[in-house]
Structures are given as C-alpha cells and as structure tokens.
Image (cartoon, helix red, strand yellow):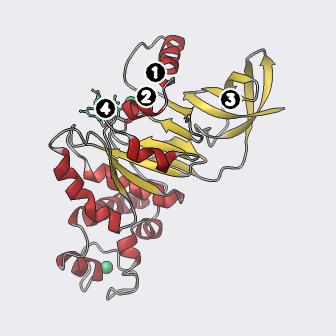
Amino acid sequence: MRTGQVVAVFGKHFWVQTDDGLVECVSRGRKGGIACGDRIEFKATSKGAGVIERVLERHNLLYRSDAFKTKLLAANLDQALIVTAAEPAFNEELLNRCLVACEAAGIPARIVVNKADLPQTAALIDQLRPYAALGYPVLAVSAKTDVAPLLPLIEGKTSVLVGPSGVGKSTLLNTLVPEADARTAEISRALSTGRHTTTHTRLFDLPGGGALIDSPGMQAFALAHVDLAGLQAAFPELRRLAGRCRFYNCRHLKEPDCAVQAACDAGEILPARLRAYRNLAQEILALAATK
Ligand SMILES: Nc1nc2c(ncn2[C@@H]2O[C@H](COP(=O)(O)OP(=O)(O)O)[C@@H](O)[C@H]2O)c(=O)[nH]1
Ligand SMILES: [Mg+2]
Ligand SMILES: [Zn+2]
C-alpha cells in the first residue's frame, strides 16, 4: 500500500500526488467520498494508476449538502479564502453560507474582495467592513494588477478559494501559481472539455510553500448537515447573545423578547446576517419536518 495526496477530483477519478509523481486513481465507490487535499492509501494497479483503498484521518472537511447529496469541497485546510467581487453582482447570502460552512467545519475564513481595480469595488469593501469585526478579515486584491497583500497570508498554508463563479478565483490562482495555466490545459485535454470554466477541484503547490485549491463556482450553498444548535454556534454575533432571549430555546425567528431581534433593531447585528441565519434556520426546520 502506498500513500499520497489527492490533488484533483473528477467524479470518481482522482489525481494523487506521491513522492515519485502523479498517479491516476479510481475509488472503490466508498461512501463518505474523497476530497481534494485528502491524504489517502492506494494500491498500485499498473504504472501511474491505482485504486484508493482508504482515506487517512482528516483535520477538517469543507462541504455542502442538501437533502439528497453531499458535495465535498476540500479537506485538510488551514483556511478558506471566500472570494467576492462587485462584478458579477455581489451575493451576500452566499458569502454568509460559506462563512457558516467554515465555522461548522472549524476552518478559519478570510474574505477576499477581488477586482480592486474596478471603481465599483470601493463600495463593496465598505459594505464588508463589519465582517472584519465578526472575525473574518477582509482583504482587497486585484488578480489582474495586485495580489501582493495576499502573499504573506497564504504562504506555508493550505488554502481553498471558494465563491460564486466569475469572481476571479481561477485568475487569482493563475497569478499566484505560475504553472497552473499549463496544468489546467493538461486537465482539459485529459478530459477533452476544452472549456475555460473550472469544472473540477484542483490543488496546486505554491512557489513559496503551502498550497492553493481552486474549486468550481457554486450558485447555491445548502447546509443540510448543520443543525439548529450548530447554526447558532456558527454566528459569532449570536453566540455573544446566548441566554439573553426570553425563551431559553429561542430560535430567533419571531419569538417575543428576542435579544437577537433587539440587537438587530439597535443596529448591532447586520440585517443581512440575520436574514441569512433565518433562511438557514427555516431550511433546517423544513428538512427536520420531512425526517
Ligand atoms: N477587472 C478585473 N477582472 C478580473 C479580475 N480577476 C478576474 N477577472 C475577470 O473575471 C472573469 C472571471 O474570472 P475567473 O477567474 O474565471 O473567475 P472564477 O469563476 O471565480 O474562477 C474573467 O473575465 C477575468 O478576466 C480582476 O482582478 N480585475
Ligand atoms: Mg474558476
Ligand atoms: Zn431570540
């Protein structure tokens, strides 16, 4: 049995980086799945090919899930870089769902505002300022003109780029990892997709140490694996108010004397955050009702 790290995921096919090169592996249809960044054990079947037998213990796993399926994003992360941009239109609900997923997985999250070269980005940076106070540092960069502020934050770490499509995740990756373009072309050839959009999750080593994982953009981010207690624990501003509502089991939806609603009315909680919490809470309650 040999070990390696999963550096690309294509459905049931995986590229595994080993000490002596890339090995193309398949999985034995094991339940639970295999994520980019996973360290695995495989059995070589021929030169350059193998079968994954076992996933070694993970430090963490970032994923999304709805009532029907689970979609693994990446494993063994030091941090998630949630990439946003003013173009295409900023999706605050999706940002918040990404933040909740990171909290639930115990993964530190940073917000990267890309396309700082566009004039409309200044307003987005202002809009996101309150997130820094919640514990999510906000960093403005331009994948096209200036990524320098990002370098010290990713060096020596394993980071994943997540966010909707079009915000510039792949452009960031190509700027930060010079040979990424060539490897992407190689993957497109191997899969004969020839498309420019990111269709698969891939891990690249950074020149200065550490690794960067690029993922396909998501439109929606369901969190069926998070329960109501987990959801409340994933909002730092709700954690601070624990036990302050009239009802000890307040769900902060429409209950009277809700300290969370009061804090929002007083301008201490961002309305968009409370909206995201309530949307997620409603989804959790609806899902629980069907079980
Ligand atoms: N103006 C500007 N455009 C950018 C920047 N980064 C990416 N783009 C453009 O945004 C579009 C989407 O980029 P892409 O990297 O494919 O986004 P992804 O879907 O998040 O991977 C492309 O047309 C890029 O050229 C940036 O920093 N500034
Ligand atoms: Mg992409
Ligand atoms: Zn409440």
Residue 264: x %, y % from top left:
22, 75
Query: CA gap, disc 2 to disc 3?
Result: 20 Å
Quarter the N terminus occupies: top right
Residue 86: x %, y % from top left:
21, 43
The amino acid type of the residue labelled 4 equals Lys
Residue 168: x %, y % from top left:
33, 34
Q: Earlier in the sequence, mark 1 or mark 4?
A: 4
Q: Is mark 2 within 8 Å of ligand 1?
A: yes
Assess disc 4: are there few (<14), some (14-19) or many (≥20) residues with their C-alpha within 10 Å of its C-alpha. Answer: some
Disc sitting over residue 144 in the figure: 4
Q: Earlier in the sequence, mark 2 or mark 3?
A: 3
Disc sitting over residue 174 in the figure: 2
Mark closer to the observer (1, 3): 1
Rendered view: 189 above or below 66: above
Rendered view: 38 above or below 1: below
**Residue shown at 66%/50% (left/top)?**
58
Horizontal side of residue 110 vs 263, given as left or right: right
**Residue shown at 29%/60% (left/top)?**
276
